């Protein structure tokens, strides 16, 4: 396992999976529920957030931190995006998603698309089981290749917070359908998206996937589709019910 010494303390380096949801399971008018995000080596996060800050600064140079990059408001023209021309909003959304192609080593995207009419279990439970086990599988493959890393999932604050924490705790002890989560260092951590550009980026990914399945609009999805976790030509990072 990679480690470094800093001021006499042992610091663990790890992969962080920033994740968010799109669609509402309580709304019968919304057929799809999406849970998606991206896994990035922790040292890469700073540079990725800096690129997103530069995009936000185009809309408020004096206070770029007040500009939140969220898929639905940007696409629909809501909130602070209401005064922006549609072409400008769409381009900003595309620019933000394009940052996913600039990281080295390449980051990995994970996404779960759940058609709630096709399953008999809680869509949130199902989606998290798929997302967390696929992230764990990614870390397990890295371990077999001699690059042992631990992982941590970071979510936007959500009404599902306590549910996801309890599910994750069970997956690490009792196990899920395919075994036990062995490479995650802790239960999910929940952040306020206002304070995290990377959570905002996860929101854009989830929204882009939602647009593809709910509206047959792949203009944003196609920007990062090649970055879903894969090995030997087989895509592991995307699961669709």
Image (tube, rainbow, N blue to C red):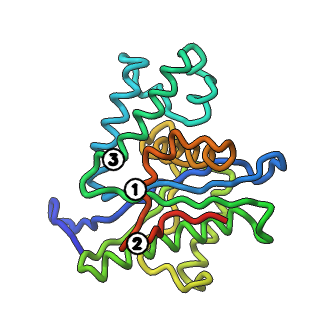
Quadrant in the picture for residue 106? bottom left
> Marks 2 and 1: CB-CB under 8 Å?
no
User: Label 2 belongs to which residue?
Assistant: 138
Residue occupying image coordinates x 68% and y 42%: 215
**Residue 172 percent location from the top left of the image:** 53, 79
Q: Mark 1 Cα within 10 Å, few/some/many (few <14, many 20+)?
A: some
> Marks 3 and 1: CB-CB under 8 Å?
yes
Q: Earlier in the sequence, mark 2 or mark 1?
A: 2
**Residue 97 percent location from the top left of the image:** 43, 40
Residue occupying image coordinates x 36% and y 31%: 53
Q: CA distance from mark 3 to mark 1?
A: 8 Å
Residue occupying image coordinates x 75% and y 66%: 122
> Marks 2 and 3: CB-CB under 8 Å?
no
Give the number of callouts: 3
Secondary structure under tag 3 reads helix
**Residue 91 percent location from the top left of the image:** 45, 27
Q: CA distance from mark 2 to mark 1?
A: 13 Å
In the image, residue 235 sits, relative to residue 155, either above or below, namely below
User: Label 3 belongs to which residue?
Assistant: 101
- Describe residue 110's horizontal placement relative to residue 44 as left or right: right
Q: Earlier in the sequence, mark 2 or mark 3?
A: 3
Numbered badge on residue 227: 1
In the image, residue 78 sits, relative to residue 227, either above or below, namely above
């Amino acid at each position: 396992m990679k480690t470094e010494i800093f001021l006499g303390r042992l610091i663990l380096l790890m992969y962080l999976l920033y994740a968010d949801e799109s669609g509402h399971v309580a709304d019968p008018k919304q057929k799809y529920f999406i849970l998606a995000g991206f896994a990035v080596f922790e040292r890469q996060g700073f540079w990725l957030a800096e690129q997103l800050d530069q995009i936000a600064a185009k809309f408020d140079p004096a206070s770029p931190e007040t500009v939140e990059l969220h898929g639905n408001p940007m696409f629909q023209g809501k909130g602070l995006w209401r005064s922006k021309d549609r072409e400008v909003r769409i381009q900003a959304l595309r620019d933000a998603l394009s940052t996913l192609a600039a990281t080295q080593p390449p980051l990995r995207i994970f996404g779960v698309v759940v058609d709630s009419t096709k399953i008999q279990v809680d869509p949130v439970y199902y989606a998290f089981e798929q997302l967390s086990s696929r992230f764990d599988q990614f870390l397990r493959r890295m371990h077999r290749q001699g690059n042992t890393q631990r992982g941590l999932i970071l979510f936007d604050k959500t009404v599902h917070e306590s549910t996801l924490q309890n599910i994750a705790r069970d997956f690490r002890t009792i196990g899920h359908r395919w075994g036990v989560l062995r490479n995650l260092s802790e239960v999910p951590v929940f952040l306020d998206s206002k304070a995290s550009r990377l959570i905002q980026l996860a929101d854009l990914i989830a929204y882009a996937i939602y647009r593809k399945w709910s509206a047959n609009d792949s203009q944003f999805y196609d920007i990062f589709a090649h970055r879903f976790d894969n090995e030997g030509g087989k895509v592991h990072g995307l699961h669709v019910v």
